[in-house]
Image: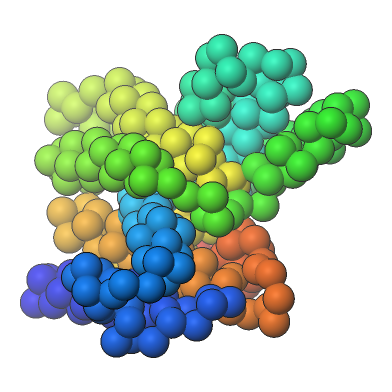
Amino acid sequence: MKRHPRIILGICILLLGIASLGLGPAKISFADTFSTLFGKNLDASQIYIIRDLRLPRILSAIFCGAILGSCGAVFQAALRNPMADPFVLGVSSGASFGVALSISLGYSSIIGLPFSALVGALLTTLFIFSLGMHTKVSKTTLLLTGVATNYILSAGMTLLMFLHHEQYDRILFWTMGSFSSSTWSQVIYTFIVSLLCIIPLSLKHRDLDMLLLDEGSALSGGFPMGRARILFLLLATLGVATCVSFFGVIGFIGLMAPHVIRLILGPSHKHLLLPTAMFGSLLLLGSDTLSRIILPSGEMPVGVITSLLGAPLFVWMLKKGRSDYV
């Protein structure tokens, strides 16, 4: 029974991916789409649109969604809070601010955007982690701290755009999120990072379950909770930073995917992690497809779509008091 959701999600991702290849400003029929994929289409423009523009974009959304979904599950386990999310806690904004600061100071060509995003995300994660380890800090306080961190980093981004007008467009990109400039090199990189996130997490699913226990129970069982938390959060931060460095801030995937799958399959990470990654892929691929077709001309940033989907869920969770695992 536990395999059925994986099969269903896999089929949904495949069908949506194929359908998405033909959708966009340039309408391409399914017959032409399949003939292009199998090398039988001689139309150079359709070949370019599908192979060089849409296919890398679709694969990037799939792998990025898998990363954000699985990393969201890690943040929720490490902080013992089902409402924790890289976007809500400000980790994605930290990565984005690191990129913007690197661009503004002219260091982006030297140290690279992925490294800049990693440093920004890591510092933000360490700040949240240090606060979350205090037993007297409530889960609500932790969430409010993340929201405040988001506001501070957003203000910093706005200041950087004001001070560096020539870099306005480049910095603005990281605040919204988009797959419009996806390349095959980014597809390969995000695919590798998705494997580096999902495979170790799947192998260490028992450790993630142990993080949900109280400190006394974990210590009595000889489980090094502090070290495990740090390692898992570092791995999740790497994944979030990779997505932000390439595609900008994309919010709420890390909140929606684990929460929905947890309601269906329960809190055990053995059955939770892979479906969560797949559902994250489906959510982000669907959001990106919507962002391409919802406007008559141009496209909407994918971060807007995910926020419109995720923000109501977050408010509902706060209203229902869903701060404990089901």
Q: Which of 243 and 151 is in front in this view?
A: 243
Picture residue at 76% right of the left edge, 42% below the top: 169
Whole-percent x, y for residue 294 in the image: 63, 80
Please identify the quadrant where the N terminus is shown.
Answer: bottom left
Whole-percent x, y for residue 106 in the image: 70, 16
> For residue 233, what is the image quadrant?
top left
Picture residue at 58% right of the left edge, 33% below the top: 95
Q: Nearer the viewer, residue 197 or 141?
A: 197
Whole-percent x, y for residue 226 in the image: 34, 23
Q: Which colour scheme is used?
A: rainbow
Picture residue at 54% right of the left edge, 50% below the top: 181
Left or right of 17, for residue 34: left
> For residue 266, what is the image quadrant?
bottom left
Q: In this view, does 253 lie above or below 103?
A: below
Q: Nearer the viewer, residue 109 or 37?
A: 37
Please identify the quadrant where the C terminus is shown.
Answer: bottom left
> For residue 16, what is the image quadrant?
bottom left
Picture residue at 25% right of the left edge, 77% below the top: 35
The answer to whether residue 260 is seen in the rendering is: no
Q: Is residue 183 above or below residue 49?
A: above
The answer to whether residue 3 is seen in the rendering is: yes
Whole-percent x, y for residue 91 in the image: 56, 37
Left or right of 254, for residue 214: left
Left or right of 95, for residue 227: left
